[in-house]
Structures are given as C-alpha cells and as structure tokens.
Amino acid sequence: MGIAAFYGSYYLGNRYASTAPVLLNLSKLERPQAITDLSLQDQYGNPFSEKGLQGHWSLIIFGYIKDAISAHDGLSLITQVKNRLAVHPELQQKTRGILVTADPEIDRPEVLLKFMARYSPDFLALTGSTKEIRSTARQLGVTIKHSPEAESYRIDHSSSMALIDPEAKLIGLFTGVVDAASIASDIQLLALDKAE
C-alpha cells in the first residue's frame, strides 16, 4: 500500500511539475515584454530600431565613455559570456553585446566607434536623443540620473544587464553580482526552451 502511494504521488508530481528551465541568475519576467519604438543610432551612424534586435540574443548594458571602467567591465563580461557559449557555435553567433550610452550629449557615434574598437565587431553601441535614451532605459527597467554637482561629472545609472530574446522581447534582467558562466548557462537554457 505504501509503495503504491509513493509511486502514485511520484507520478502525479512529475506529471504536473513545471517544465520551465531553472535559471541561475536571470530575474525573469512573468511575461516577456516587446521592445518598441526604438529610434537610436549605432556607432557607425546607422539607424537602429527594435528590428535590429530580432534574430539575436542581446545582452544590453547602459554606461558612458567618461566612466569607461563601468562600460568596459560590462562589455568584458559579455565577451566572457560569448566565449563560454563556444560549445554552442550557432547560439554563440546569435548572442551579442549592446552598450546604450547614458550620456548621449557627449557619446556621439564617432566617440562610440573609437571606444568599441577593442570589442567584438558584432557588439553595438547605441546613442540618440536624451528623450530616446530615457525611453529605451524605461523599457529595460534602467534608471539614469545626472549628478547635479558641477565639479564632478557623473551619471548614475542602473548596473543591470537586460536579456532580449530573438523576437525583440525583454526576457529579464541580470542584477547584482553575476558571472559569465551562469549568464551563459541561463541563455543556453532559454534558447533550448524556445527551440522545443
């Protein structure tokens, strides 16, 4: 009797168990949110809309060139993620990093082009009007605040990393201390889940 109850509960528990992937670091949204109405420019001066997100797994960070350390750290982490995805060449090729400037007044395309020269050629840096940057930040759950002190030029911004799927939808955010291995693992799980 006890064995039958055990197997019965095991069967029912597994039959109705969640099939969602168990993610290591991603704070996943309950429902992915479509990214809309982007009107930005990349580092080459080309227009960039939400259509530019389609077909890729995009890891998006915000930063600015006067605080190059923060932008460099984020882009270096994304480079490490891409390296970890080498065991899945197609997924590695579809994954890219995007830096959105928090300082569009100074970070014009030519400034971003020079800064991005040290990273993978498929990485993008985006700029636009202050209004467009703030709109993009809102869609990605990022806050941007300019420091009021004249002596110190500082822009405070969220340090989260947004994950956009190949349908140009925000899947979730990587926040806090994260590492390349767990980000790569989460992307692999989500890509596999989408393929099924």
Image (cartoon, rainbow, N blue to C red):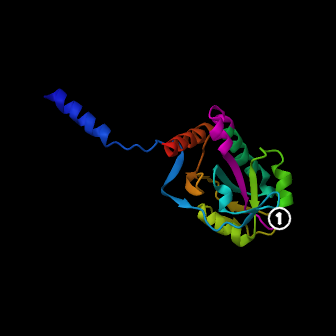
Disc 1 secondary structure class:
loop
In depth, the one of 48 and 10 nearer the eye is 48
Residue at image position (46%, 42%) is 21
In depth, the one of 41 and 178 nearer the eye is 41
In depth, the one of 78 and 167 nearer the eye is 167
Image-quadrant location for residue 181: top right
In the image, taking residue 17 as reference, residue 102 lies left or right, namely right
* Residue at the spot of label 1: 106
Q: Tell me the magenta residue range.
A: 83-107
Image-quadrant location for residue 8: top left
Q: Is residue 106 magenta?
A: yes
Residue at image position (37%, 44%) is 18
Q: Is residue 85 magenta?
A: yes
Residue at image position (57%, 53%) is 173
In the image, taking residue 42 as reference, residue 165 lies left or right, namely left
Amino acid type indicated by mark 1: Ile
> Outermost residue, bottom direction?
131
Q: Position of residue 70 (x, y in %)?
A: 73, 51
The N terminus is located in which quarter? top left
Crowd around label 1: few <14 · some 14–19 · many ≥20 (10 Å):
some
**What is the number of callouts on the image?**
1
Q: Position of residue 171 (x, y in %)?
A: 54, 53
Q: Position of residue 93 (x, y in %)?
A: 68, 41
Residue at image position (57%, 57%) is 169
Q: Position of residue 94 (x, y in %)?
A: 66, 45
